Every structure is written in structure tokens, then in C-alpha cells.
Image (tube, helix red, strand yellow):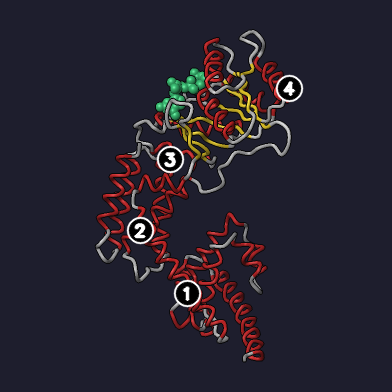
């Protein structure tokens, strides 16, 4: 998996390294090559489009660090965007605060539901939980037997009433049984179909409504190719899936479709199935996968270090400016960018004097957009204007709005906020001089 994607990305990125300068032209060429590599690996075309757009924006927005070559910086940007694509949020399982946690595993036929139910039960056991598996695929006797065989292998009880009792009744009884017998987690295996069909979806929906599970995990088979995205969307729309299990990750598919599922559905990837054995399941780590796809860990950590050093320098500069009662637009941008790394933008901005209006205007989903806007406005100013925005006339502001793709209103708003902060820092530094030893 990912062999050819990795090979192509690595080759493309190696090409731009050592070029010294990243010109607009070789940047375009590189982006084109990345695009081809992603598309050929079956990454969804919309995902590719967004991915490249983000890389382009990040590359333009980034200060070039003295210590690193632009090509190396690009490696880091691509690496970070792959992590973004895969989702870097919390992907652990939700458990009920008390009582029984129920986890439904759903998916198309043959995608690995039954196998993952057993793998999960085994994993949870190792974590000290007490799981039971409930057979919710009762149409074929073989399906129940398969689960029972797996249950024996991992010494875990399977609840089933055979093929004659309606599935909803069985699951309801199974949940009661689990509660009575001191189990803390019920894993429910469900039936699959070759394609999305109404009857199956209704059955799954009925089960969901009845047991209100803490987790609905969708198994998606990495070998499926592009269609995987549509299937995942259909399941998610009806069931509000809480996590994905990418199965057959050990196979030799191109992998790109699997990479797209998180980006398209917004559902986090929680596990990967990496083989047929019970122990072949892994908690999903976006960084590790990004490393595997890009295989340039050395460069990534090198750039990270250089960025940290640069950040330190900037922070020191800003601090010393503040202490001297000087405060420029560059300082404003620096301080927002520094603090952005600490937590959600709105909460940080709220802490900044005079900025609470702005914080209210931001919901954190828009926070990145807001930061980008501020950055674009400040970067469209001349160095003189950044040092002293009071020299700006209306015509300057019109130029800046145009250059940054914003409005004169937005430029004015930023200037007002800047003025408030500057005033406050001035007061602070004069207070400080009172105490100076
Ligand atoms: N290589 C590999 N094979 C897997 C993985 N997970 C499941 N399989 C295999 O895929 C096949 C189907 O798995 P099942 O667990 O029966 O799939 P299912 O979704 O329950 O299938 P139905 O109940 O028929 O809908 C079996 O042969 C499994 O051994 C995996 O992560 N890697
Ligand atoms: Mg099954």
C-alpha cells in the first residue's frame, strides 16, 4: 500500500530540494507532479484539489526560514497537509461513563465487520474491559458460526438466538443479557450487503435507534477504490458514523481512496485492519501514516527545529518591542501566530486586550480563515506601513484591501484593533519603567 504514491511524492520533492530557490515556475511544476501522484493513487479529485490549494496557500504564507531551503520547507508543508487530510483529532473510542458501552460495527459485505468485531473485543480485553459480542447478522447460519469460532479463539462470549428470532429482538435481549452478566462493552456485528440497499440501511437505523450506541464504526475496505467514498457518505448520512476502520490496509491497493474517506466524510479514522489475524488491528496514528507515505522524516524534523528556533527569535523580538513601547503590525501578526500554536484562536484573542470584539466574531471553524485574512492584510502593507500604520491614507488602504483580497472595512477594523493594543502596551511599558530597577 502507498508504495507508488510514496515513490512519486518522494521523487517529486527530492527534485525541488537543493534547487536553492523555489520559483513560481518550479513550484507550479511540483504541484502538478504532486497532483498526478495523488490522482494516480486514487485519491478523490476534490480532495486533491483542496489539498493542493492548501499547500499553495501555506507555501505563499510561510516566511522562508534562513536555515532551510524552500524545497525542504515544502516537504514539511506537504507532510503537515497529509496529517490534516487524515485528521489529527482525537480518535479514541467513546465509552459510556457508567454501565454498558455498545459499539456497532457496520459496512458492506465482506469488508471485514465480523473480523474487526473480534479484533476489537480482543483489544478491549487487553485493556482490561469485559466485552461480549452480539451476533446481529443472523440471515446466514455461517455468519453466526464465524463469530462463535472467533469468540472461542479469544475466549469471549457470543450472544445469539440462532436464525429464527428477529434481529432487533435478539440484539435487545443481548444487551439486557450483557448488562445482567456484568459485561461493560457489547460489540454488535451486523449484516452486510453487496451494495447500499434500503432494507439493510433501515435495519441498521432501527438497531441504532433502539440501542443508542456510543460508537458506530464503519468498516471500509481499502481495496475497494474510489467508490469507497460514496459508500462511506451513504452510511454516514443515515447513521452518523462515529469512526472508520480502514480494513485490508495490508493489501496492495493504491491506498488513495482510503486516504480520501476522512476528508470527504469528516468521520475520523479510528483503526486500521492490517491482516487476517485477530491481533492485526492498529489504532490509527495520522503522523505515522504521513511518515510512511512521505518517508522523509529527517527533513520534516529538521524543518520543525528550524521553525522552533525562528519562533523563539520572533517571540523575543516581539517581547522586546513591547517592552520598549514599540509595537508594529509585524509584532501583532507574530503574536497572533505564536499564540495560535497554543490553543483555539478565539480563546487566545479573548485574552488579548482590546480584541474581545474580534474573538466574538470568530468561531473556531473560521479561525484559520481569520488568521489568514489578518496575515494577508499585514503582508500587503509596505514595511513603513507595518511599522507605523498611522501613515496610511484611504488610497493606501484601498491598495492593501485589493492586494489582500479583503475590504477597506476589514483593513480599518484591523487598524483599530492594532491601535487599541498599542495603546495598552504603551501603558504597560510606562508602568514597567516605574518599576525598573
Ligand atoms: N488482509 C486482510 N484481510 C482481512 C482484514 N479484515 C478482514 N479480512 C478478511 O476479509 C474477509 C471478510 O471478512 P469478514 O470479517 O467476514 O467480513 P464481513 O464484513 O463480516 O463480511 P459479511 O459478514 O459477509 O458481510 C475474511 O477473509 C477476513 O479474513 C484485514 O484487515 N486484512
Ligand atoms: Mg460478517
Question: What SS does tag 2 mark?
Answer: helix
Looking at the image, the residue that sits furthest to the right is 180
Tell me how far mark 3 sits from mark 2, CA to CA. 20 Å
Q: Would you name the residue on which mark 3 appears?
A: 259
Mark 1 surroundings within 10 Å by alpha-carbon count, few (fewer than 14), some (14 through 19), many (20 or more): some
Question: What SS does tag 3 mark?
Answer: helix
Tell me how far mark 3 sits from mark 1, CA to CA. 36 Å
Instruction: Using the rendered view, name the quadrant where residue 299 is placed.
Output: bottom left
Residue 176 vertical position relative to residue 418 in the rendered view, above or below: above
Residue 316 screen position, x and y as percent: 50, 77
- Left/right of residue 134 with respect to residue 81 in the rendered view: right
Q: Which mark's residue is nearer the viewer, 4 or 2?
A: 4
- Quadrant into which the N terminus falls: top left
Tell me how far mark 4 sits from mark 3, CA to CA. 38 Å
Residue 21 screen position, x and y as percent: 28, 66
Q: Would you name the residue on which mark 2 appears?
A: 74
Q: Is residue 193 visible?
A: no
Question: What SS does tag 4 mark?
Answer: helix
> Between disc 4 and disc 2, whose residue precedes?
2
Q: What residue sits 41% from the left and 40% below the top?
A: 44
Q: Would you name the residue on which mark 4 appears?
A: 176
Mark 3 surroundings within 10 Å by alpha-carbon count, few (fewer than 14), some (14 through 19), many (20 or more): many
Which of 348 and 395 lies nearest the eye of the viewer? Answer: 348
Amino acid at each position: 500500500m502507498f508504495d507508488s504514491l510514496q515513490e512519486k511524492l518522494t521523487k517529486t520533492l527530492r527534485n525541488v530540494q537543493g534547487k536553492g530557490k523555489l520559483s513560481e515556475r518550479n513550484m507550479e511544476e511540483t504541484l502538478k507532479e504532486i497532483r498526478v501522484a495523488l490522482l494516480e493513487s486514487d485519491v478523490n479529485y476534490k480532495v486533491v484539489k483542496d489539498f493542493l490549494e492548501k499547500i499553495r496557500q501555506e507555501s505563499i504564507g510561510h516566511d522562508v526560514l534562513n536555515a532551510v531551503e524552500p524545497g525542504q520547507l515544502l516537504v514539511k508543508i506537504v507532510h503537515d497537509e497529509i496529517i490534516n487530510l487524515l485528521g489529527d483529532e482525537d480518535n479514541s473510542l467513546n465509552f459510556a461513563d457508567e454501565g454498558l458501552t455498545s459499539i456497532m460495527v457496520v459496512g458492506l459485505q465482506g469488508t471485514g465487520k465480523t473480523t474487526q468485531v473480534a479484533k476489537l473485543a480482543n483489544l478491549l480485553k487487553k485493556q482490561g474491559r469485559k466485552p461480549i459480542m452480539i451476533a446481529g447478522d443472523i440471515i446466514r447460519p455461517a455468519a453466526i458460526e464465524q463469530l462463535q469460532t472467533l469468540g472461542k479463539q479469544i475466549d469471549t462470549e457470543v450472544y445469539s438466538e440462532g436464525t429464527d428470532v428477529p434481529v432487533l429482538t435478539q440484539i435487545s435481549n443481548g444487551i439486557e443479557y450483557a448488562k445482567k452478566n456484568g459485561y461493560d462493552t457489547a460489540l454488535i456485528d451486523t449484516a452486510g450487503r453487496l451494495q447500499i440497499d434500503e432494507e439493510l440501511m433501515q435495519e441498521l437505523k432501527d438497531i441504532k435507534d433502539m440501542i443508542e450506541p456510543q460508537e458506530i464504526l464503519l468498516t471500509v475496505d481499502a481495496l475497494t477504490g474510489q467508490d469507497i467514498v460514496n459508500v462511506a457518505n451513504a452510511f454516514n448520512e443515515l447513521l452518523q458514523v462515529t469512526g472508520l476502520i480502514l480494513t485490508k490496509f495490508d493489501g496492495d491497493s493504491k491506498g488513495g481512496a482510503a486516504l480520501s474517506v476522512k476528508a470527504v466524510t469528516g468521520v475520523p479514522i479510528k483503526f486500521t485492519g492490517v491482516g487476517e489475524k485477530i491481533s492485526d488491528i492498529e489504532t490509527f496514528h495520522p503522523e505515522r501514516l504521513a511518515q510512511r507515505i512521505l518517508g522523509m522524516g529527517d527533513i520534516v524534523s529538521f524543518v520543525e527545529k528550524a521553525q522552533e528556533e525562528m519562533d523563539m527569535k520572533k517571540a523575543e523580538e516581539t517581547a522586546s518591542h513591547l517592552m520598549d513601547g514599540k509595537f508594529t503590525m509585524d509584532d501583532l501578526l507574530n503574536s497572533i501566530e505564536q499564540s495560535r500554536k497554543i490553543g483555539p484562536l478565539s480563546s487566545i484573542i479573548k485574552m488579548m486586550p482590546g480584541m474581545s470584539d474580534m474573538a466574538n466574531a470568530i468561531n473556531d471553524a473560521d479561525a484559520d480563515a481569520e488568521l489568514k485574512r489578518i496575515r494577508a492584510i499585514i503582508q500587503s502593507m509596505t514595511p513603513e506601513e507595518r511599522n507605523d500604520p498611522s501613515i496610511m491614507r484611504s488610497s493606501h488602504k484601498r491598495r492593501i484591501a485589493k492586494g489582500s483580497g479583503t475590504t477597506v472595512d476589514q483593513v480599518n477594523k484591523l487598524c483599530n484593533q492594532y491601535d487599541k493594543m498599542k495603546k495598552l502596551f504603551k501603558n504597560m511599558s510606562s508602568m514597567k519603567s516605574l518599576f525598573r530597577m
